Image (spheres, grey):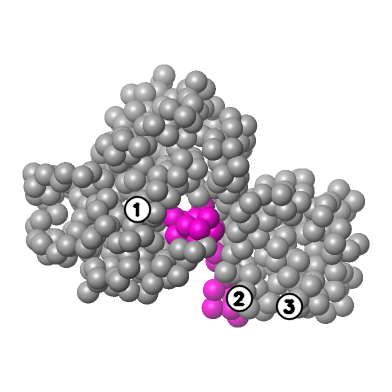
Amino acid sequence: MIEELDIHNQFKESISRFKNFDPHLKRISSVPFVYRSPLLGEETFHSSGIYLITGGRQVGKTTFLKQFIVKLVTERKIRPENIFFLTGEIIEDHYILRRIISQFYENITSHGYLFVDEINYIRDWDKSIKYLSDAGFFDDISVILTGSDSQILRISMKRFAGRRGASDRVDFDFHPLSFKEFVCLARKDLKPLCDRIVAHPLTAVLKGYENEHNKLTELLYEYLIHGGYLPAINEYHLNKTISKSVMNTYIHWIIGDILKYNKNENYLFEILRGIKSTYGSQISWHSLSKFLSIEHHKTVSDYCGILESIHVLHIQEAILEHKLTGAPKKNRKIYFRDPFIDHAITNYLNPDMKIKTLKEIIQNNVEASAYIESVCVDHCKRWLPTYYIKGNKGEVDLALVKNNKMYPIEVKWTGQIRENDLKQIRTYENGIVLTPRSSVKKMFNSFVPLVRFLIHVSGNQLNIE
């Protein structure tokens, strides 16, 4: 088994070999855009403890671990024998996992770093991790675990209360690149502007912003094609398209994860078709079950719960305004977490889909609105509880809850905004309307450029004058 893991541990032979022949580092050496997480510069993982990184497929979890190993060896001068990388995809059960970790433990000479990637693939993995922790194996080891099924991992990690270490932060969520991260990666000259947008109140006049607004809008249209997934970003940058193979790779992972739950691919197909047919609308599990060959709302609920857990969907509840919590008995709205996921699923449902046609559709603001709304939902859900409002005078797309206060947000990606469409949000003094325009206006609500909003909330804040 150790020999099978050698391909991921080539730094033990030499760091140059690791950089040139590791499958993940080799892949990013030939692409135009390489993302480096800010976590690489933090001290968090250097204290003994059990850390968890969750996130969907292809968001860069494994690449981050490999980049971190390079940093450990080259900058912190950690000896290779004190580092070990395991991939859960080839480890069958927790007995094998415990044997491999025990072998690594016997050979370390100082503080160690153990990486177990996609640990959720290993049957009963938490039993061995808990046993080794209780036995003192991890007293001088940083254990970094990753996985793409956040629900199962979070439940399992509850068994490790008091064993996680002394660091203030031990859980991390990896997402596709935010719009701000994409802009700063693709257009480094716009990074100072992005930093200023984050630093200033959302509704403040920002000198020089309007001159750059069109550039940001053009980049947003591109973001709606490839989303925040680096394989799609790089391929689109090189070829102005996204190949079927890139989309199919992602779909095959979704299907594989669904099959792990002993679920049916035909039902998955039908449920995804139902979500696409009702996209952005208020729906119940019962109404969505009508798209199934066997109608049962519990089946729909189970599948959607799994898809949410593996970072495919966002399930948006209506808000109970007097409690500032979700209303589980009311209809929901379902969104894909990223435009690339949306396109990959569209390709799965309709293999005749062409990126050229998709680009033409997105240039139409009415057609683009659904993608725009889902991007706004995703960016907000990354850091705050987020709902939608179902009021007496209509619907509001987003309701953020911060410091026990609700912030209603309406997305209007159109040049002409009708007052009739704003009846509900006008009932809130702190309501925000997001528009394609470049200027901030304060009338009955605050009208804010949508691209500026996306960049601003990427700083995990909502700062309003």
Q: Which mark is residue 214?
A: 1
**Residue at left 70%, top 66%?**
68
Looking at the picture, tell me which residue is in the foreground, 117 or 341.
Answer: 341
The segment highlighted magenta reads: 161-187
Q: Mark 1, residues whose alpha carbon is within 10 Å: few (<14), some, or many (≥20)?
A: some
Q: Name the residue beneath numbered marker 2.
A: 42
- Whether residue 20 appears in magenta in the rendering, the answer is no
Side of 281 relative to 302 (left or right): left
Q: Earlier in the sequence, mark 3 or mark 1?
A: 3
Marks 2/1: CA–CA distance: 35 Å
Looking at the picture, tell me which residue is in the foreground, 226 or 391.
Answer: 226
Q: How many marks?
A: 3
Determine contact: label 3, label 2, CB under 8 Å: no
Marks 3/1: CA–CA distance: 53 Å
**Residue at left 69%, top 52%?**
28
Q: Is residue 269 visible?
A: no
Image spot of residue 90 (x, y percent): 77, 45
The answer to which quarter of the image holds residue 357 is top left
**Amino acid under label 2?**
Glu
**Residue at left 54%, top 38%?**
240
Image spot of residue 179 (x, y percent): 44, 55
Q: Residue furthest front?
A: 211
Q: Name the residue beneath numbered marker 3.
A: 139
